[in-house]
Amino acid sequence: MTTKPEILALFSQGLDSILAIKIIQQQNLQVKALKFITPFFSYDIKGRETEYCEQIRKSYAIDLDIIDLTPNYLKMLAAPEYGYGKNFNPCLDCKIMMLTQARIKAEEMGVQAIITGEVVGQRPFSQRRDTMRRIEKLSLTEGLLLRPLSAKLLTPTRAENAGLIDRDKLFDFSGRGRKPQMALAEELKVRDYLTPAGGCLLTDPGFALRVKTLYQQNLIPTATDLELLKFGRFYPLQKADEFIIVGRHRADNLELLATATEDYFIVQLAAMAGPVAILKGSADQLSSAAEKLCQHSKAKNLSEVEIKWRRGRENGAFTIKNSLNK
């Protein structure tokens, strides 16, 4: 029988979030960790949540739940209340959404604090003191949200004031340096954690531009659209929610075939090996997808090219005149 948790934690599998949990566990408190996923971060867990949670339990002795934010996140991304970062990343709205969900969970479960692995000054915007206070206020987590790695630099929380958490056993880390965390990890025997280089795909300029393209014309893409954007060459069509993607290599082709559902056309060369093209659009755009296939295959040297396609239970074939060979 699992003991009722006293503390909720936001978990990324990065070193800081693991250390924050370990610090609190050392005070003999039961922690339940939450990992949020969207198509832009940690989505590879989708469909294997049980396996992943068991892996985390074995690796770190952390009890974990997975929460998929995708539907609400995709709506928020269309018009984040507090705007975008350098690319198409709604960092403030993202943090507020996650902490709001954690607060709701905390209220349901009757836990007395929410912890994160945030470090004052580690990130130039979202982890400034003023921004951290603003996020607390907007997510209604003031007095509830505790950052164990920087707690001694911040206002004591209700859990500290009540004596549930011993403030003297918390830390005063700040800045972008990682040496204090690395030393603490060695002391606590924490290994096998994700490097800080991961993170949200919306901070990647190239990928963010693709996503932004699909959000034009007041449209909101699907989770599958966004998964397909991660592979191959991207060609937007006239409508924002229509596009062609052509695989660059075998790995892309396999991912595209595995990801595309019956809502998408799968287009291939009929008589020779070549890339896979995915079309989200109408049947009269199949010729455009075929032209892109030819452009990125040996078929560009042929005057006529046989094309095959399928979508769900539908399938067909046609021949195009190759404009590249004229």
Image (spheres, grey):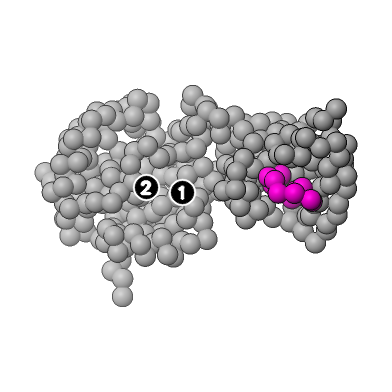
Look at the numbered disc 1 and give the secondary structure of its residue: loop
Seen as rendered, the residue at the extreme bottom is: 1
Q: Is residue 142 left or right of residue 293?
A: left
Q: Position of residue 161 (x, y in %)?
A: 19, 45
Report the residue at 55% width, 30% height from top: 206
Q: Name the one closer to the observer, 56 or 319.
A: 319
Where does label 2 land, which residue?
A: 12
The amino acid sitting under disc 1 is: Ser
Report the residue at 34% width, 55% height from top: 33
Residue 19: within the magenta?
no
Look at the numbered disc 2 and give the secondary structure of its residue: loop
| The C terminus lies in quadrant | top right
Q: Which residues are magenta?
A: 265-277
Q: Is residue 67 left or right of residue 145?
A: right
Q: From this viewpoint, is residue 207 visible?
A: yes
Report the residue at 34% width, 49% height from top: 13
Where does label 1 land, which residue?
A: 42
| Contact check, label 2 and label 1, Cβ < 8 Å | yes
| The N terminus lies in quadrant | bottom left
